[in-house]
Image: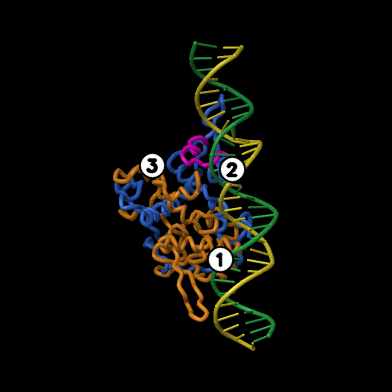
Chain colours: A orange, B blue, C green, D yellow
Amino acid sequence: MRWEDLADQPCSMARALAVVGDRWTLMILRDAFLKVRRFDDFQKSLGLARRVLSERLALLVEEGVLEKRPYQERPVRYEYRLTDKGLDLYPTVLSLIHWADKHCAGPEGPPVLHHHKTCGCDFRSVLTCSECGKKVKPRQVEARANIAAPRQPA
Amino acid sequence: MRWEDLADQPCSMARALAVVGDRWTLMILRDAFLKVRRFDDFQKSLGLARRVLSERLALLVEEGVLEKRPYQERPVRYEYRLTDKGLDLYPTVLSLIHWADKHCAGPEGPPVLHHHKTCGCDFRSVLTCSECGKKVKPRQVEARANIAAPRQPA
DNA sequence: TGACTTGGTCTGAAAACAAGACCCACAGTG
DNA sequence: CACTGTGGGTCTTGTTTTCAGACCAAGTCA
């Protein structure tokens, strides 16, 4: 299967990955959540080829995850900001970071802590059910085809 | 920056992506969560090159996300199962799927629904704080360097 | 005038990928 | 015994991507 065909699959995971499944895209989004907004800052922070960065940013803008807007005239300079669609990726990004905090960090612990300003604690992300509010475990979930929508996985 | 160098970065996101940031890996894991376990079944389901699949599975085994175990002798046949480390990726996988359900699904709705057996409802995943149990929004979170661990983002 | 900054493009070499042929061990069938 | 089928891969070849680094253009600064 070709990568471009993923977006057409009747599978939400495939559609998501057609947008953010690229090797660098989630790193770019991590930076975006850390308030990086400019081309050069992304480039310095990530150290990826400028051409690749420019392609990725353009794709994310096209997909509506980032928004390109001028922050000054003469000369025009642009910044990339997360849209609401982009902000909705926060749970994904954070749970991935917390996964690596748990499983890939050395004895010195994770490099960054996340502080919940509302309650004043450093926290980990927890997956909960939108209906009952309880913590969800993989075994408690059953994936079912949506009869209203056509065919296939996930 | 080279892709292989990611794993050495003092950034959990980079470390996570060194394991699952590959184009196909999250699709493989999605299948694994849907109880696909055999080489040929992955291959048929995803349609990727067998060589690439074999490399990815080997990497996931090496990283401890999947476990390769014989399910019969004479002839020996293997299956790939999620380890606890692999199961811990469920929140990430599910939140990505739910993101695409919300933002990429057509008018017919998402192709697959997730049913929480404990409460009996179809649900969406919600990011909550491990400390106070409340829903977390991006703006309520502050990322702070962990003094105990060395340098940089995450 | 020249140097610097931002936000990119362009190029050639190196790596990853797709498709499909091929391989091996074993099982079952006749 | 030969013949076919299955599971779990490997190999080859040609096409895409990616990388590193050079280059470029508009505008500002000194």
Query: What is the three-letter code of the residue carrying label 1?
Result: Pro
Identify the secondary structure beneath mark 3: loop
A2 or B10, which lies in front?
A2
Report x, y in % for residue D11: 66, 36
Report x, y in % for residue B1: 63, 60
Residue A63, quarter of the rendered image:
bottom left
Q: Nearer the viewer, mark 2 or mark 3?
A: 3
Question: Which chain letter goes with mark 1?
Answer: B
Query: What is the three-letter code of the residue carrying label 2?
Result: Glu
User: Can you see residue A103?
Assistant: yes
Report x, y in % for residue B121: 29, 48
Residue B104, quarter of the rendered image:
bottom left
Identify the secondary structure beneath mark 2: helix
Instruction: Please name the residue shown 55% across and 61% down the image.
Output: A110
Report x, y in % for residue B82: 50, 43
Neighbour class for label 3 at 10 Å: few (<14), some, many (≥20)? Answer: some
Query: What is the three-letter code of the residue carrying label 3?
Result: Gln
Neighbour class for label 1 at 10 Å: few (<14), some, many (≥20)? Answer: many
B17 or B131, which lies in front?
B17
What label sits on residue A81 in the rendered view?
Answer: none
Magenta span:
B39-50
Tag 2 residue: B55
The answer to whether mark 3 and mark 1 are in CB contact below 8 A is no
Say which label, 2 or 1, has the lower sequence index.
2
Q: Residue B132 lies in magenta, yes or no?
A: no
Tag 1 residue: B153
Question: Which chain letter goes with mark 3?
Answer: A
What label sits on residue A152 in the rendered view?
Answer: 3
